[in-house]
Amino acid sequence: MDYTDTRKSTPVAVHPELRRILLANPTTESLSTIIKYQLFDQPCQPLADEILRLLPYWEHQACAGNGILAPLIQYMVQHSPLLKNNKIIEANLLRIRILASTPGIFSFPPFEIQEHLVQSLLMSDILADLPEFEVVSFSAAEIDPLTFDLTCFNPSLHTRHYIQNLFYLERREAILSVLAHIAKNYPLIRTCRKAYALMLSLDSPNNWGKHPFCLRLLANRFLDNKLVN
């Protein structure tokens, strides 16, 4: 849904306390008010700082099924130039938007994964073997240059850079969407927890080209293509 308003009007000044109330626990009504007042059309640095503080609360709400966060974040990104230039906020908002737009709720406390991320990530790369990830495909033209490196499973620095470029935004979103679905709906809680841990560990686009899960996923698609051909 595109929340762009083609009408020309002047943004309304909003008191910081009202802004915090509107953003702290998003609802359909508060989103309507935010759009009415054009809250994100004003280049306000304190607003970016406030969003940074709100990210942990939004993360919890997204895990608990607050779907209104998805259109709120979409509207924010469309209208605030400050957010587009902040990589930390961008990465967190992407994950929160995907979690919020995925039906279901977490069957475990998300803060447990956040506080013990390294432990939660142990053996998490095996999730790349799940059939749910068959929807994420790579063309033969993309994979063929990697034949030697994937067979040895020891990509060179040049190859890792090539792999990094394979995980462009749309593909990253597709993978995160599958992980969000697994985290909220998979019948095994251990797998749900690992899926969420993977989402957290993929918060930087620069990590995808060397992440064990991504390399395993790519190797699986390489083997799939070999079997078909």
Image: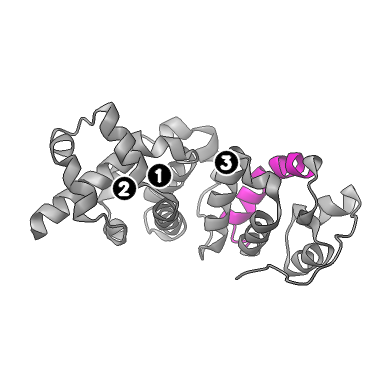
Q: Residue at x 64, y 64 (%)?
A: 71
| Numbered disc 2: secondary structure | helix
**Image point (90%, 55%), residue name:** 13
Give residue 102's position: percent from left, percent from top. 51, 62
> Residue 224's x, y, as percent?
16, 54
The correct choice, above or below, for 201 with respect to 9 in the image is above
Q: Provide the secondary structure element on which disc 3 rests.
A: helix
Q: Mark 3 sits on what residue? A: 111
- Looking at numbered disc 2 in the image, what kind of residue is underneath it? Leu
Quadrant occupied by the C terminus: bottom left
Q: Which residue lies under the disc numbered 1? A: 194
Residue 87 higher or lower than 8, as above or below: above
Judging depth in this view, the residue of 28 and 43 nearest the camera is: 43
Q: Earlier in the sequence, mark 3 or mark 2?
A: 3
Specify the amino acid type for callout 3: Phe
Q: Amino acid at mark 1?
A: Lys
User: Badges 1 and 2: C-beta atoms under 8 Å apart?
Assistant: yes
Q: Which residues are magenta?
A: 47-66
Task: Estimate the spatial distance between the alpha carbons at disc 1 and disc 3, rounded to whole Å.
Answer: 13 Å
Query: Relative to residue 211, is residue 35 depicted above or below?
Result: below
Residue with the mark numbered 2? 127
Q: Residues within 10 Å of mark 3 (few under 14, many from 20)?
A: few
Check if residue 41 falls in the magenta segment.
no
